[in-house]
Amino acid sequence: MPTPHHAVTIDATATEPGPLATLATIGAPRCVDDALSVAGALGRLVLDRPGSELVDRWEALATLASLDVGAARVIEPHLDALTMLQDARHDSLGDDEIGGLRWGVFAAEGGDEPLTATAKGDGTYSLTGVKPWCSLASRLDAALVTAHLGDSAERGLFAVRLGEGVQHDDTLWAARGLREIPSGPVRFTDVEAVMIGEPGWYLRRPGFSWGGVGVAACWFGGAVGIARTVHASATTTDDAHVLAHLGAIDELLHSARRSLAEAATIAAGDSTERAAADARLTAKRVRATVARASDEIIDRAHRALGPAPLALDSAHAKRVADLQLYVRQHHAERDQASLGSALAGGPAPW
């Protein structure tokens, strides 16, 4: 049976975990501040290794999620933000400034007061409006935020400090999963910001899709953690039903891991327009595959183990509640319809 600090692998050909995944095996952060410290350490490695493989980052996130899904949920957007800042190569933000901050990514849309960016004439912008679903806004130093450009429908990506002019509301967060990571709305009032990339760059870049796969790697790691609990139970019983669930769980994890590994191979290709299209389609498939596997693994764990671990094992109960909420970032049939639409626009791929 794997130890609690066993690295989760995606690249089955690797003889040992990469540097980021190795660092992630040190132990599960005990609180949000611990997780933010780990995020800083992992982020410095990302900045020091600009050509580092995505598979190493995904294995680090999966490893963290297998220990504590909440820890991965804290760290994933920080690494995503650093990756975007690297990709944009923005001259006004040096590595020292970037690496010394705790970053989030606030890109959800909705609400009656959408966030709007107004050019100030000196190369900076002013952000005003409300941004929904801003995870840990009260604990972070800075964020990459999407905002509408004036009255147009086009959006830009902006780097902003979460200080003066920023009001966050954590009181609406009633979740039982990811309880330590409130994701409430944030009101920006004339907050200075710097645009990252050109308008629309955030969505057009291939990295947008790979960032979505990074989230799926977290789901995968959470599912591995639940699977390990089932495996531990199976080693002490000859119950055929428990063993059948364990076999089905292994099948699901193998399929999910292979989809992540395929994405890592594609991500290692070039950054042409064709590669960006391949990235979008691959990411849709991977997220759907891992989300389905996660949902079924949770269900099979319930049926294999019964109520005892949910009631008496705090780590297992937290992992299940956290993963159930986190995986809802996959929008079920809506995302499947998006995948179907992408496929219907060309020849059958099978």
Image: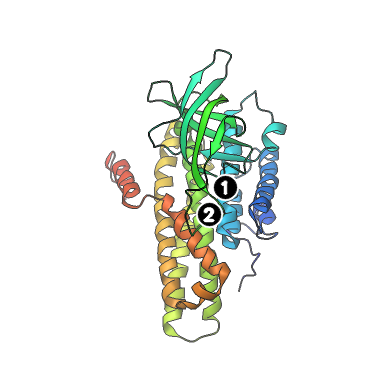
What amino acid is at disc 1?
Answer: Glu
Indicate which disc, 1 or 2, sits on the residue closer to the N terminus. 1
Residue that lies at the very extreme toward the bottom in this rendered image: 238
Instruction: Indicate the secondary structure of the residue bearing disc 2.
Output: helix
Label 1 crowding class (10 Å Cα cut-off): few <14, some 14-19, many 20+?
A: many
State the image coordinates of residue 345 (x, y, percent, origin top left). 28, 38
Q: Is residue 11 visible?
A: no
State the image coordinates of residue 73 (x, y, percent, origin top left). 55, 51
Of the numbered discs in the image, which one, if any, rests on residue 113? none
Question: Which residue matches tag 2?
Answer: 218
What amino acid is at disc 2?
Answer: Cys
Q: Nearer the viewer, residue 42 or 267?
A: 42
Q: CA distance from mark 1 to mark 2?
A: 8 Å
Q: Residue at x 47, y 63 (%)?
A: 254
Instruction: Indicate the secondary structure of the residue bearing disc 1.
Output: helix
Of the numbered discs in the image, which one, if any, rests on residue 76? 1
Residue that lies at the very extreme toward the front in this rendered image: 171
Horizontal side of 90 relative to 96 (left or right) equals left
Q: Is residue 162 visible?
A: yes
Q: Residue at x 60, y 74 (%)?
A: 1
CB contact under 8 Å: marks 1 and 2: yes
Residue that lies at the very extreme toward the right in this rendered image: 96
Quadrant hosting residue 108: top left
